Image (cartoon, helix red, strand yellow):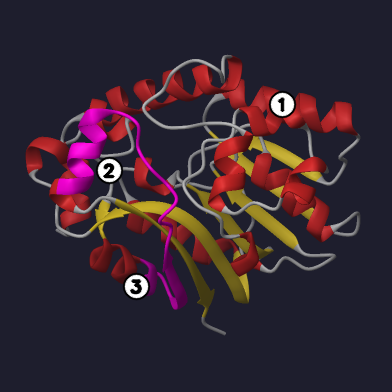
Amino acid sequence: MTTAESTASRLDTADLKQRVQQMYREVAEHPTHAFHFETGRPLAERLGYPAGELDAIPAQAIDSFAGVGYFLDLAAIRPGETVVDLGSGSGTDSFLAAHATGPSGRVIGVDMTDAQLAKATRLARQAGVSNTDFRPGYLEQLPVQDASADAVISNGVINLCPDKPAVFREAARVLRPGGRLAIADIVTATQLPQGVTCDAALWAACIGGAMQQDDYRHAIEQAGLRIETVRANDRYRFLSERAQGATRTYGVTSISLLARKEP
């Protein structure tokens, strides 16, 4: 049994699911409330999202933005491509991808929180963005056909999943040969202790689920994805004292990463 599988077997995944859904329902419906992480356009711009591109998508989606890094330059989405957004939330990255891929392409957003899906779907309809499709689902079992995507993207969500190797296997399954995985996520320099990794409250806070960075990369490579680029996101920061303490003790940090499915 791998470390990830052992942790998932001990974690109360039902409790984790409930906590994560509750938190991100709040992010969707009340984005100005205080969270342990930052939200909104100031965060997106500080992480590197170009202001002009943000201007082109629904502002209410950006209000609920809770990403941990910028990675769309790594994704290099081209017109006509199919993109799958893992944990699409209220749609910031999905709308930016939809703009990049244009009317001849499409973006499939997958999320498990009904409030996020409802908000993204409503905003797409109001803005006349017809090349997005927001679907309910879990990242370990994507509601997406095999070998149907040119790119899979995700921002700050995979760390919340109990079985990360399964997420990467699913990403590889839906990618076409040569397709790209471009993500931002939270990882650690050293392995978190069991008291942290088995605490659903800390997982929901984007701390307890952070995987040791070498193990994280290994899980990606074991799924048949070749890592091409990894970079640190020094502009991301946690707000709560508990999260800041974990950052100092275990080297919790944000990275952006590009990997490609082997042909």
Mark 1 or mark 3: which is in front? 1
Residue at (45% x, 45% y) in the render: 156
The residue sitting at 53% across, 22% down in the picture is: 27
In the rendered view of the protein, which quadrant contains the N terminus? bottom left
Secondary structure state at the residue bearing disc 1: helix
Depth check: 108 or 156 in front? 156
CB under 8 Å between discs 1 and 3: no
Left or right of residue 27, residue 254 in this image? left
Q: Amino acid at mark 2?
A: Gly
Q: Residues within 10 Å of mark 1 (few under 14, many from 20)?
A: some
19 to 46, vertically: above or below: above
Q: State which tag comes first along the sequence, 2 or 3.
A: 2
Q: Which mark is residue 222?
A: 3
Q: Which residues are magenta?
A: 220-248
Decide which of 151, 44 is in the foreground and name it: 44
Where does the image place residue 169, in percent across and percent down from the top left? 43, 62
The residue indicated by pointer 2 is: 209
